[in-house]
Image (spheres, rainbow, N blue to C red):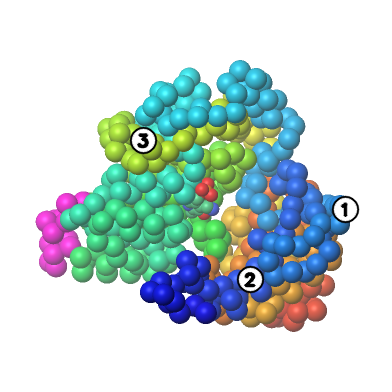
């Protein structure tokens, strides 16, 4: 029935491939999980009657509160009370719900100016511009920076939004092995005229794009290595800090803060407000000249709606808390709690004998399940114990390295993490996930 009939195929036909039929709908429990309320320390599930493989299940009218290990709520700002929620409520009374227009039409409000100034100061750059989605930020800013005649070199594991923006930019795209500086240098040498590594003659511009913290791997980019190569080969560097801003570094200011590198060494610092700030949207921080250019040339700002007023207030308030400008001490406490929780959980899992990927300071902890059949099984073992986790498999990961992605938050207590460790221990026994009797110390 998927073949062309009367000269055309049904619109849905291309989507009915192996991945959708055999894998995604069978194993991706998360998308079909009905939830309600704030995705904070806990998340409330709406109980359902049937275990249908589509969204046509019936709700029973009851709910189950689960420990939430599935939201990127790194600093615990996903909450319906506190300074951010109070400020957002007041803002809604003054500004309403939406600007109902792009900035190119309605203009720039005082809230935009406030957030752009705050975020530029926070990451240590001259200027910033903001978008209503992180995805749109990457999708529309790459085409505003590079195009025909330019070379864009991307880490192999970069996020879909970077790949999307790169593709529609029209530049030549090459990739290097994840976090492998030798492979990046190989690509640079091959692409820049051999024997003259400092000349860019074949390319108008060369842009290297990486992420600060990779959300499927928990790995951190090798920023010192990138900066050294940048000096040698004179390319521009774009770092997507979606998962590292607010989450890494002693002051929560991302990978530059973590490695002690001056943010001015990096040309573009991009980030999202969806994770550490409990809001929505994305930003680009750079020099004033670059930001002025992006503002008038990227399609997202010109043709798309701008972040909602209350969202801007949430961003501004959370930024001020992290920086210690309001509620002194609270930001620092959140950062310390996140750092402690990340290491505590990772070490606990290693001690139990699980294989976990990533950097010791990463608040994302991928726990390897390997076999795709274990994806729904693990998620259900956790739900039985009232814990929500994200399980991921192909095509987000290679087919044989399916995994659980545990997202640690400053909102979690040590007791929460002990409860999670006990549940993982039991599920690990049931599903034969533990590969050793555990390490003595871990790193
Ligand atoms: N960049 C990276 C690295 C991401 O992981 C994501 C989404 N998780 C985005 C960009 C898109 O951000 P948003 O979800 O805020 O649209």
Q: Earlier in the sequence, mark 3 or mark 1?
A: 1
Tell me which residue sits at (74%, 81%) in the image.
432
Compared with 422, 433 (above or below) is below
Residue 43 shows in the view: no
For label 1, being within 8 Å of ligand 1 is answered no
Determine which residue is flagged by label 1: 62
Point out the image quarter for the C terminus: bottom right
Tell me which residue sits at (65%, 68%) in the image.
28
Q: Residue 25 carries which label?
A: 2
Residue 36 shows in the view: yes
Compared with 137, 393 (above or below) is below
Percent of width and height locating residue 10: 48, 70
Percent of width and height locating residue 60: 86, 57
Q: Distance between the residues labelled 2 and 3?
A: 37 Å
24 and 362: which is toward the camera: 24
For label 2, being within 8 Å of ligand 1 is answered no
Residue 98 image-quadrant placement? top right
Tell me which residue sits at (76%, 62%) in the image.
57
Determine which residue is flagged by label 3: 302
The answer to whether residue 353 is left or right of residue 128 is right
Name of the residue lying farthest toward the front = 6
Name of the residue lying farthest toward the top = 94
Mark 2 Cα shell of 10 Å, populated few (<14), some (14-19), many (≥20): some
Secondary structure beneath dot 3 equals helix
Magenta span: 192-205
Question: Magenta residues: mostly which secondary structure?
Answer: loop
Residue 334 image-quadrant placement? top right
Magenta segment: does it hold 285?
Answer: no
């Amino acid at each position: 029935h998927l073949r062309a009939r009367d000269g055309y195929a049904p619109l849905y036909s291309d989507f009915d491939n192996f991945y959708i039929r055999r894998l995604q709908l069978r194993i991706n429990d998360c998308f079909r999980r009905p939830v309600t309320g704030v995705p904070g320390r806990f998340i409330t599930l709406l109980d359902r009657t049937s275990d249908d493989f589509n969204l046509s299940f019936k709700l029973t009218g009851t709910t189950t509160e689960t420990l939430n290990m599935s939201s990127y709520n790194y600093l615990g700002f996903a909450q319906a009370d506190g300074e951010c929620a109070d400020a957002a409520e007041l803002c809604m009374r003054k500004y309403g719900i939406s600007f109902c227009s792009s900035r190119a039409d309605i203009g720039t409000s005082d809230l935009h100016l406030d957030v752009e100034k705050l975020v530029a100061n926070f990451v240590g750059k001259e200027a910033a511009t903001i978008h209503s989605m992180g995805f749109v930020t990457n999708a529309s800013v790459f085409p505003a920076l590079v195009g025909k005649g330019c070379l864009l070199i991307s880490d192999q594991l970069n996020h879909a939004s970077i790949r999307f923006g790169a593709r529609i930019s029209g530049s030549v795209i090459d990739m290097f092995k994840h976090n492998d500086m030798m492979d990046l240098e190989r690509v640079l040498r091959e692409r820049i005229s051999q024997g003259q590594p400092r000349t860019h003659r074949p390319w108008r511009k060369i842009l290297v794009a990486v992420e600060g913290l990779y959300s499927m791997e928990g790995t951190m980019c090798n920023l010192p290595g990138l900066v050294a190569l940048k000096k040698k080969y004179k390319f521009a560097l774009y770092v997507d800090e979606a998962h590292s801003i607010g989450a890494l570094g002693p002051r929560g200011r991302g990978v530059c803060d973590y490695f002690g590198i001056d943010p001015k060494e990096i040309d573009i610092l991009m980030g999202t407000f969806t994770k550490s700030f409990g809001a929505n949207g994305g930003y680009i921080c750079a020099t004033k000249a670059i930001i002025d250019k992006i503002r008038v040339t990227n399609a997202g700002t010109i043709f798309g709606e701008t972040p909602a007023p209350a969202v801007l207030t949430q961003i501004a308030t959370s930024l001020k808390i992290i920086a210690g400008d309001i509620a002194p001490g609270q930001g620092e406490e959140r950062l310390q709690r996140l750092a402690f929780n990340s290491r505590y959980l990772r070490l606990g899992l290693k001690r139990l004998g699980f294989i976990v990927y990533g950097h010791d300071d990463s608040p994302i902890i991928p726990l390897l399940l390997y076999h795709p059949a274990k994806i729904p099984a693990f998620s259900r073992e956790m739900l039985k114990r009232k814990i929500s986790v994200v399980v991921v498999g192909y095509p987000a990961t290679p087919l044989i390295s399916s995994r659980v992605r545990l997202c640690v938050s400053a909102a979690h207590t040590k007791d929460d993490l002990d409860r999670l460790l006990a549940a993982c221990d039991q599920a690990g026994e049931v599903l034969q996930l533990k590969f050793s009797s555990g390490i003595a110390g871990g790193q």
